[in-house]
Image (tube, rainbow, N blue to C red):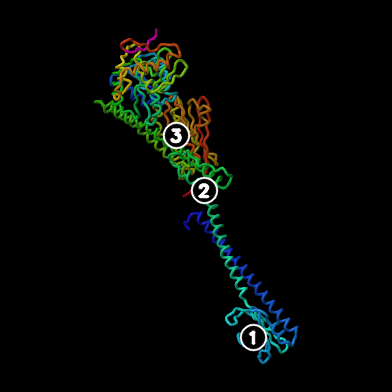
């Protein structure tokens, strides 16, 4: 397992490198954000440990750049205790976990093990199909540059559909994931909401995002 | 007086007005009464003149001249006291018996058979004349006047006081609004301000003054808060390193060598913490850029030597040479603890920025009036922007290893120490090194607090 430690406090970086090496990790250390992007682009890391308070720039920028370049290595953000909004931003940008300083080494290695278990599949923070884009963090949907206004239910349904592109989703499954336990109605409610969705995201633009699979349910069309 | 201003204003107004009204009432009453009395007296004298000028022997005419109505009557007396003539309303009883006639040619208020009258006693020749006029009408008129004054004055007092109460309330309402908006102001919402009244009056100026005060409070509060924020952040770094170092050392069985290394690292962090805490303490005590100092005659040369010795180990590790260039003179009056602290900060910076194999020089010069302490390094120097802000708290440069090692406190302390001694600090910077020069005025001997 290979770890990239991005930390500009030299002493702390040294301690982390030493401790992780003792745990059997291969460790690279850098103190600058731009170097961190280079390291993580050139190498396949299993974990990136990213300090938020880099002096030469922003840990947030490093995270954004890596995800934009489709580098899916799990990122654990190390922050001071009081930057809640930065932690939220980072998690929404695609960071996987965070640790607050002061670091307890035992917790750090446990978190590294946890994110390594989840692997490194592509997990974009913004969902899309064609030029339809859905951002769960800002709850915004757009077709190209045209914003689309959805109700909460429509949004939830579209989000679930976009998270499973190309897979046929049965009405029962959609009801299960988008409606809660209190919903005791007919599964045909899905048909109603799919019709609403198409009226907003497809019909005005002459596109077909959601296909009907006769007798089963629906499927989000993957790129042709 | 604890009553609200509104009550006090209205009460003071009502009280003053009452006094004025009573005074006016008394004046009017007295003048009116005197006028009435004078009119009666004139009438009495006219009657007396008519009686004497007539000299008529006709008893009926004499009788009429003494008085014709219920209100006017009189008697004429011989020197013996016998009544020679009298109007018909009174008996033969001499009026002189009612009141001793000590008065001559003067009027007096008295009663005749329980009736209030004014009497005039006049003597001409052998005849003494006693004339009376009833005061019933005059008393009635005065009674009416008194009633009028009571009612009118009372009504005026009530109406004017009510008006004063209303006006005072209206005048004070903006004050109450000010108060209420000040209540909402607290330490948690420092950016709240008192609403400025529209009218350009005293209250507007008061609100503006209060807001200006709040601005200053907020600024100083935010300075304090950001200082505490930064200070705790700076303290946290070495503390975190210390605890991580120890945690790592304890995670598994360690050889003596490894443990020694860990303890060494921990000791370094502890020293860093100590320096940081000392600096923060000084800055926390700083007010308006200076700190309390306790000057005493100090041999600066020896102070520099001692400080340099404490850095020799670190300089050795960094591959640096420390040079002292001293021109020893008589002891100067400085606070040795603070000067040493400033020197320590300067050396700490100089060692951090100097490349391996370089030299750090401490130069002390004494010109008689001033003393300069200069620390020269061979680092990359200050960028113009950094030189601008280098003395601000938490502004940090970059070390030779490009790591932001320091907390950005060192030069702030140097500045504060120099300023407290009445001195200055300046930066002489080139790409081949920087020199920080601290200039301290030599205090006169008599100024020394011994």
Relative depth, front residue between B142 and B221: B142
Examine the rendering and report whether any part of residue A37 can be seen. Answer: no
As drawn, the label of residue B173 is 2
Give a yes or no on whether discs 3 and 2 share a subunit: yes
Cα–Cα gap, marks 3 and 1: 109 Å
Label 2 close to label 1 by CB (< 8 Å): no
Residue A3 position, x and y percent, is 33, 19
The residue carrying pointer 3 sits among few (fewer than 14), some (14 to 19) or many (20 or more) residues within 10 Å by Cα, namely many
Q: Is residue B55 above or below residue A163?
A: below
Q: Chain of mark 3?
A: B
As drawn, the label of residue B409 is: 3
Disc 2 residue crowd, few under 14, some 14–19, many 20+, Cα 10 Å: few
Q: Is residue A55 magenta?
A: no
Instruction: Determine which of the numbered discs, if any, sits on residue A32 in the image.
Output: none
Secondary structure of the residue carrying numbered label 3: loop
Kindly report which numbered mark, 3 or 2, lies closer to the viewer in this rendering.
Answer: 2
Marks 2 and 1, how far apart at CA: 69 Å
Of circles 2 and 1, the one toward us is: 1
Residue B247 at x, y = what percent?
29, 29
Ranked by sequence position, the earlier of labels 3 and 2 is: 2
In the image, residue A125 above or below residue B327 = above
Bounds of the magenta segment: A217-224
Label 3 to label 2: alpha-carbon separation:
51 Å
Residue B176 appears at what percent x and percent y?
49, 48
Reading the image, the residue beneath label 1 is B102
User: In this image, B236 relative to B385: left or right?
Assistant: left
Location of residue A43 with respect to B356 vertically, above or below: above
């Amino acid at each position: 397992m290979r770890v990239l430690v991005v930390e500009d406090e030299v002493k702390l970086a040294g301690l982390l490198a030493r401790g992780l090496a003792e745990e059997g990790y291969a460790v690279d250390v850098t103190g600058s954000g731009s170097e961190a992007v280079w390291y993580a682009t050139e190498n396949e890391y299993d974990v990136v440990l990213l300090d938020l308070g880099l002096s030469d720039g922003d840990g947030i920028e490093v995270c954004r750049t890596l995800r934009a370049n489709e580098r899916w290595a799990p990122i654990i953000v190390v922050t001071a205790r009081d930057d809640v909004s930065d932690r939220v931003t980072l998690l929404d940008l695609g960071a996987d976990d965070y640790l607050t300083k002061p670091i307890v080494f035992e917790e750090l290695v446990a978190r590294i093990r946890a994110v390594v278990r989840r692997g490194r599949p592509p997990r974009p923070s913004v969902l899309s199909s064609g030029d339809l884009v859905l951002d769960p963090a800002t709850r915004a949907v757009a077709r190209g540059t045209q914003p689309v206004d959805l109700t909460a239910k429509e949004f939830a349904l579209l989000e679930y559909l976009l998270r499973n592109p190309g897979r046929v989703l049965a009405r029962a499954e959609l009801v299960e994931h988008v409606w809660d336990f209190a919903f005791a109605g007919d599964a045909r409610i899905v048909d109603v909401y799919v019709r609403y969705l198409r009226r907003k995201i497809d019909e005005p633009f002459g596109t077909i995002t959601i296909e009907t699979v006769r007798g089963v349910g629906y499927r989000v069309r993957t790129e042709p | 007086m604890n009553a609200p201003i509104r009550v006090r204003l209205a009460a003071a107004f009502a009280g003053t007005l009452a006094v004025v009204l009573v005074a006016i009432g008394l004046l009017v009453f007295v003048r009116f009464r005197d006028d009435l009395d004078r009119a009666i007296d004139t009438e009495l004298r006219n009657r007396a003149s008519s009686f004497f000028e007539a000299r008529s022997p006709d008893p009926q005419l004499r009788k009429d001249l003494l008085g014709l109505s219920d209100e006017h009557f009189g008697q004429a007396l011989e020197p013996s006291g016998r009544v020679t003539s009298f109007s018909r309303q009174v008996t033969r009883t001499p009026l002189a018996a009612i009141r001793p006639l000590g008065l001559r040619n003067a009027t007096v208020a008295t009663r005749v058979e329980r009736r209030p009258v004014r009497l005039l006693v006049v003597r001409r020749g052998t005849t003494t004349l006693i004339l009376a006029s009833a005061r019933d009408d005059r008393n009635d008129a005065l009674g009416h006047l008194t009633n009028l004054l009571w009612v009118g004055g009372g009504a005026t007092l009530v109406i004017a006081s009510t008006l004063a109460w209303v006006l005072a309330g209206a005048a004070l309402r903006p004050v109450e609004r000010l108060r209420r908006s000040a209540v909402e102001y607290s330490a948690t919402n420092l950016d709240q301000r008192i609403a400025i009244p529209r009218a350009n009056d005293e209250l507007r100026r008061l609100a503006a003054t209060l807001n200006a005060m709040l601005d200053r409070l907020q600024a100083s509060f935010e300075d304090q808060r950001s200082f505490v924020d930064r200070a705790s952040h700076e303290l946290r770094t070495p503390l975190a390193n210390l605890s991580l170092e120890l945690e790592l050392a304890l995670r598994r069985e360690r050889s003596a060598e490894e443990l020694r290394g860990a303890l060494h690292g921990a000791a370094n962090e502890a020293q860093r913490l100590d320096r940081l805490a000392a600096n923060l303490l000084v800055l926390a005590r700083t007010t308006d850029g200076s700190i309390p100092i306790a000057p005493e005659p100090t041999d600066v040369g020896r102070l520099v030597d001692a400080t340099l010795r404490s850095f020799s180990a670190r300089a050795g590790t960094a591959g640096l040479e420390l040079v002292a260039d001293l021109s020893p003179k008589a002891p100067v009056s400085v606070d040795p603890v603070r000067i040493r602290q400033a020197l320590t900060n300067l050396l700490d910076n100089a060692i951090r920025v100097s490349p391996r194999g370089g030299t750090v020089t401490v130069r002390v010069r004494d010109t008689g009036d001033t003393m300069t302490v200069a620390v020269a390094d061979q680092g990359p120097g200050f960028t113009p922007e950094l030189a601008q802000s280098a003395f601000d708290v938490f502004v940090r440069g970059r070390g030779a290893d490009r790591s932001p090692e320091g907390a950005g406190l060192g030069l702030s302390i140097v500045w504060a120490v120099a300023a407290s001694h009445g001195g200055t600090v300046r930066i002489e910077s080139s790409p081949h090194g920087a020199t920080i020069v601290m200039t301290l005025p030599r205090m006169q001997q008599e100024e020394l607090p011994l």
